[in-house]
Image (cartoon, helix red, strand yellow):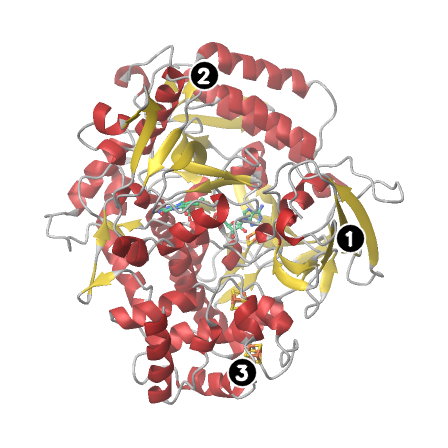
Amino acid sequence: MDLRGGVKVRLEILRRVNAQSEPYLQVIEYTPKSKNDTVAFALSEINKGGYRDESGAEVSRIMWEHSCLQKKCGACAMVINGTPGLACGARLSEINKNGVIRIEPLRKFPVTADLMVDRQVMLDNLLKLEAWLQTQVKINERQAELAYDASRCLQCGCCLEVCPNFYAGGEFYGMAAGVPAARLIAELAPDDGKALKRGYDKHIFEGCGKSLSCKSICPAGIETDRMLARSNAAAVWKRIFGRCQKQR
Amino acid sequence: MRKVIIIGAGLSGLACAVTLAKAGRECLLISKQVSERAQSVLAEGGINAALDVMGENDDAALHFEDTMKGGCYLANEEAVRGLTENAPGIVRWLMGLGVPFNMENGRIVQRAFGGQKKRRTAFAKSSTGKMIMSALIDEARKYEAAGLITRKPNREFIRLITNGSECRGVLTADTRSGQCFEEHGVSVMCTGGMNGIFPGVTTGTTANSGDAAAMLYLQGVRFSNLEMIQYHPTTIAIAGKRCLVTEAARGEGGRLFINKGGQRYYFMEDRHPELGNLSPRDVVAREMFFVRRESEGEGVYLDMTGIDESVWLRRLPDLREEIKEQTGTDAKSEPIPVKEGIHYFMGGIDVDTRHRTSMKDLYAAGECTSIYHGANRLGGNSMLGAIYGGRTAAEDIIASYGVQDGQEEKESVHSLSEEYAAEADTGLIYRIRDILLSGLGIVRNESEIKKSIAELSLLKGERQYNLRERARIELADALLECALIRRESRGAHYREDYPKRDDERFGSMTYAQYENGRAIYGFKGRSEGEA
Ligand SMILES: Cc1cc2nc3c(=O)[nH]c(=O)nc-3n(C[C@H](O)[C@H](O)[C@H](O)COP(=O)(O)OP(=O)(O)OC[C@H]3O[C@@H](n4cnc5c(N)ncnc54)[C@H](O)[C@@H]3O)c2cc1C
Ligand code: SF4
Ligand code: SF4
Ligand code: FES
């Protein structure tokens, strides 16, 4: 359906006042200003005030996290029509199904209010993984290329949302940890990062079923399979990266 | 003192935290959102440093000259000297942290950027800010594990805790529970540019709401250079904001034109032959405004079709994808329509060369401050300024305060009072924005600025405002008043009624300070009322 500015959509938003309260579904009719309107834009417009829901009740401010509005900060990840993605990248005209768009918070993290979730576990896992460089490095062009791709991770959490093996607090950290770790592993000085490499094997490589649901969902387009090599086996690492390099 | 309190976790906040931690000092790194969401991740084009790797005999003195000249000699000379001399060391440090800068034959390469005569901008394709942030975040994590940096994301700055003209600490609130916290200690503001004063029309993030700047202003912290707002020449409208097309697009060969008499008129090349499309941003933006006005109705285009496939691939891949995604046009095969958009605030919290503010025990760094960029910031100098500023503030704190100095750290928890919890009304925010936009466009004049001031003053009397609203109105007023008293044209501030630069009367930055319910405006280095 081609949807230009002017054609109404029905936004079904799963809301809740705070972490303790019961969720409820609020339905709001929204008329896009242009065919480029995104879910993020619609939420901002509604939050300017003056909207009523299906039952006629005034819509209170919808809590959602945002910052860049251009798919570069990962703040606005949520579940849109059943699929996790960035609200600022989801054009109403492209995603609406029979005029209906359902918007829910990510499900693998505790909801703090409406569409906002607490993604602290992602930071905690990176800390546990010892994801840092102990010493200054001198990298070559090849390492730079790998590091570039891995450094693009937005920490949005979409990959964790679809991963069959990840749950918050579990031993498996998922790609949101695996990708940043891959940057470091690509750059490590020879005798640096022993703990990181061990942690990578234990908390990422070994727990991963290689189903690659994460790859197709990643809004940054990161080829997560390239990040999935057993870090302490330099040969495997090189082979996998090497092959993917050529494909690009 | 114990813990230093840093508000803001973008480049400046992270640089400050890491510098403190490296010296064994503890800090709290408080921010509204985690670092990954900070505006710094949006920076595309690169960071400047006279590394002299391009065989062009570049050096720090030339970088200094370009920066001072680009800023029309308003910037703090001594500070710019420090900035440019330390730039190569900063970029090398970043390389050591593993930032994947573009390299050729094993060596870092640099690109051309506006207002600079040498290729001096180090870059990582077109996502330089993201790459630097990722490396700094990992570096900060190392010190977090060592207990030196304590990260507190999801905390909003509410106000300073003061004692007369001294800063004692900050009051912050959890963005989810509303619980608030009093932290006592030396504080560093790293809250970024005041985009939120102009919602929807800047290239920046919604997180930088401007509330922090407004509250500091209302609390008597001195601001300077507020009239200097940078309009970036090449932005495109997307849902809810303006999206930047990095200056690197012109650095790599992009050309601006307008259709005139059925032909493409490459106005920058014609009117500014020396630097052409890479003239300083204020010059390009103004010229775009003028050519559009001359040829009623026509829009300006950026022509990147001449850029080599290999350059697109190796140096601008993200940009091409982004433009395609946002506009549906492949910039490799078709010119794209562009327009000026608000991009950077040269003005902000007034700081000295050591990044001290007018308030004792309060520091500031990054885009929320005013010191290095004068009347116009050169592309690639603000990431540099943010990192150098954060580092300089930290170094001064290390040198000036002992580990046991100051008062005990105190964290008292209670919930935010209604006075501070009340947000500014959205309708009001947009009204203030529109008043400001009509007075503070690319081309300004006395009557428009005065009209805006009058509208703002009417608005002031309309109703009772909550604290955040009052702060916002007062800061908006200061922006206009500073633009009014600068009765000359310089850099980003172009006055049609005073088109010439007047060094004798206006050779220094404006300042604005709010004290005892009254705002004072003037020029730095001159006594009040001399304006
Ligand atoms: C699209 C774009 C491209 C750019 N490209 C370049 C470039 O190529 N080269 C260059 O040199 N510069 C560039 N810049 C400018 C540069 O990125 C910024 O000036 C710089 O990164 C600012 O860093 P900062 O640390 O001052 O602030 P920011 O990165 O903006 O961080 C501000 C921090 O403060 C926090 N914060 C804000 N308000 C509050 C509050 N009330 N309470 C608590 N926390 C708060 C935020 O959460 C955030 O953590 C670009 C800017 C944009 C928008
Ligand atoms: S490949 Fe599958 S199991 Fe592994 S991280 Fe991705 S989604 Fe999870
Ligand atoms: S890997 Fe992709 S989906 Fe996962 S957190 Fe990073 S950017 Fe998001
Ligand atoms: S707001 Fe930054 S990714 Fe959507």
Query: Badge 2: few (under 14), some or many (20 or more) residues near its Cα, within 10 Å?
Result: many
Q: Residue at x 35, y 78 (%)?
A: A243
Q: Position of residue A24 (x, y in %)?
A: 84, 57
In this figure, which residue is indicated by the disc labeled 2? B484
Q: Quadrant of residue B456?
A: top right
Residue at mark 3: A210
Camera-near label (3 vs 2) is 3
Q: Nearer the viewer, residue B374 or B401?
A: B374
A124 or A248, which is in the foreground? A248
* Same subunit, tags 1 and 2: no
Q: Which of pointers 1 and 3 lies earlier in the amino acid sequence?
A: 1
Dot 3 amino acid type: Lys
The answer to whether B257 appears left or right of B152 in the picture is left
Label 2 marks which chain's residue? B
Q: Secondary structure at mark 2?
A: helix
The chain containing the residue under callout 1 comes to A
| Residue at the image point whose x is 56% and y is 16% from the top | B453
Give me the disc on residue A12: 1
Report how far apart the C-alphas of labels 1 and 3 lie in the structure: 33 Å
Q: Quadrant of residue B298?
A: top left
In-front residue for pair B194/A36? A36
Across and down, in percent, residue B38 comes to: 50, 52
- Ligand 2 is within 8 Å of the C-beta of the residue at disc 3: yes
Q: CA distance from mark 3 to mark 2?
A: 63 Å
Residue B163 visible in the current orientation: no
- Residue A6 in the image: state x and y as whole percent: 69, 36
Question: Amino acid type of disc 2?
Answer: Leu
Label 1 in the same subunit as label 3? yes
Q: Quadrant of residue A169?
A: bottom right
